[in-house]
Image (spheres, rainbow, N blue to C red):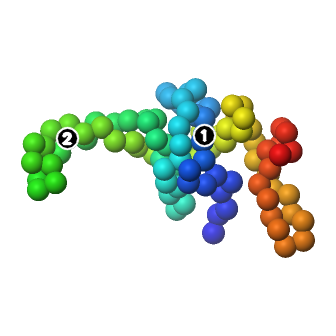
Amino acid sequence: MKKFKLKSGDTVKVIAGDHKGSEGKVLQIIKNKDRVLVEGVNLVSKHTKPSAQNPQGGIVKKEASLHISNVMLIEDGVAVRVGYNVDGDTKTRISKKTNK
């Protein structure tokens, strides 16, 4: 199983693709496809039929996934690479730039 250095709820910045420079919060990580959903980034229009939950139907905007390699974690307003510091049984996530 792959280990990703991002978690749900992290703030990330898009570093490649059409939405380069956009920032948002990670909503979900799709592990088997190496993809991540970021809030407010990569919105697509989905046409929906009328249903019980949405009696009007119409066009709905929703987030599409991005590849996990196209995003970086934001620490103190700066995009940073992430590493781990292991002390005995504890494993803490640190930024490579600031070692925090």
| Residue 19 image offset from top left, x and y in percent | 50, 29
The amino acid type, in three-letter code, at marker 1 is Val
Residue drawn at x 15%, y 38% is 58
| Residue 95 image offset from top left, x and y in percent | 79, 44
Give the spatial CA distance, label 1 vs label 2: 28 Å
Residue 35 seen by the camera:
no
Q: Residue furthest right?
A: 88
Residue drawn at x 75%, y 42% is 81
The amino acid type, in three-letter code, at marker 2 is His
Q: Residue 64 versus residue 89: which sits nearer the camera? A: 89
Q: Residue 17 versus residue 55: which sits nearer the camera? A: 55
Q: Is residue 27 above or below residue 32?
A: above
The N terminus lies in quadrant = bottom right
Q: Tell me the element at label 2.
A: strand
Q: Which residue is mark 1?
A: 12
Residue drawn at x 55%, y 33% is 23
Q: Tell me the element at label 1.
A: strand
Other residues around mark 1 within 10 Å, as few (<14) / some (14–19) / many (≥20): many
Q: Quadrant of residue 59?
A: top left
Q: Which mark is residue 47?
A: 2
| Residue 90 image offset from top left, x and y in percent | 82, 68
Q: Quadrant of residue 61?
A: top left
